[in-house]
Image: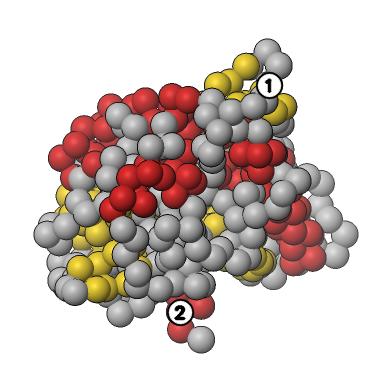
Amino acid sequence: MHGPRCPSRPLLGFCLAATLAPAACDVPGCARAREESAPAASTEASAPAAVPGAAQAGPARVVVEARAMGTSLVVAAYTSEAMDEAAIRGRLDKAVAEIRRLEGLMTTWRPESELSRVNAGAGTRAVEVSPESLEVIEKSLWISERSGGVFDITFEAMHGLWKFDEDIDDNVPPRDEVERARGLIDYRQIAIDRARRTVMLARPGMRMSLGGIAKGYAVDAAARVLRGEGLGSFFVQAGGDLYIAGKKPDGSRWRAGIRDPRGKDASDYFAMVEVEDRAFSTAGDYERSFIKEGRRYHHIIDPRTGFPASESRSVTVWARDALTADAVDDAVFILGAEKGLELVESIEDCGAVIVDRNNKVWVSKRLEGKVEVLRQPTDGV
């Protein structure tokens, strides 16, 4: 996770741009185009008493857009007889504030953050962290174990070798430098003391980043805020991480589009899916990448090699909560379709749509009948 700028950082599913786009603008993405098992989000709270001045007309969509965690945020809900636009907007602002609070805990771009202090103490001391940071780190270790280590938050040791962000360049780092950095990647050397709520990296020079998973946690946290404020129908999106709650005011489900990884823009999607009370997270090789000598290099790094993963073009994971979806998508992307689907099927209430390296579309069993594949994705490097 990082601040608004993200220079010089290779990432496992990090800094993703919006990849789930709406049909008829149900979900964020298309309007802008035209001008990655945690507890599920808490159950819906009782609706509040009518707000003075509440809108009596038909429901209107209220959208708040912002920036946090190095990506765009979009939070939206509809007005009702109980809540007018001002009341809805105030609640959406609270959700954005919660995401920014979590960013302050988990970013590695601020020296005073919890993650920065853990990194500074690598090999020397344990650092006390918040319950929120501890939960995300423990979820990271869960998916590391489940995936055989292909998801590993200690990949931050490779910081500076690859440049895929605003300072992108097409220099491929020498293999010996990659190997030296890769020697510091090992999630098993993260020591957690739950009683004291401390985290320690075992070896000097090790670093961790939660950029491949913390946006999902933040999306879930924002959803809990909105449910606690009495909203039952809304969506929260942070880059490629999306949670959709309830149905639209007319009783229909939200529809989201899955982006064509070689399509013309973010609103070009090859598949659609109806969504209710579920999260999506997408890992793709197209947003932060360069092509050199006929090969695409991108920001999703395989810790087994230190180079960009090569088995997939995009992976969209469907789950009950955004933290799980965000944890799983990078692992599946790196593993590839066959091993990735084995992982997905082993996780309760989890599904995936994969476009593999050869442009073949794979749909997991739990999403069969839920995903409408409109066409074959565009081919290309």
Image-quadrant location for residue 105 = top right
Does residue 350 appear in the picture of this structure? no
The image shows residue 183, relative to residue 308, as above or below, that is above
Q: Amino acid at mark 1?
A: Arg
**Foreground: disc 2 or disc 1:** 1
Residue 327 in the image: x percent, y percent? 43, 40
> Which residue is pictured at 68% across the width and 62% down the height?
79
Residue drawn at (50%, 73%) of the image = 167
Q: Position of residue 259 (x, y in %)?
A: 32, 66
The foreground one among 114 and 339 is: 114
| 54 relative position to 26: left or right | right
What residue is pinned by disc 2? 33
Q: CA distance from mark 2 to mark 1?
A: 43 Å
**Label annotation for residue 262:** none
Left or right: residue 358 versus residue 133 is left
**Considering only order in the chain, which callout, 1 or 2, is on the residue closer to the N terminus?**
2
Residue under pointer 1: 197
- As rendered, which of 238 and 135 lies closer to the eye? 135
Residue 7 visible at all: yes
Q: Residues within 10 Å of mark 1 (few under 14, many from 20)?
A: some
Which element is circle 1 on?
A: loop
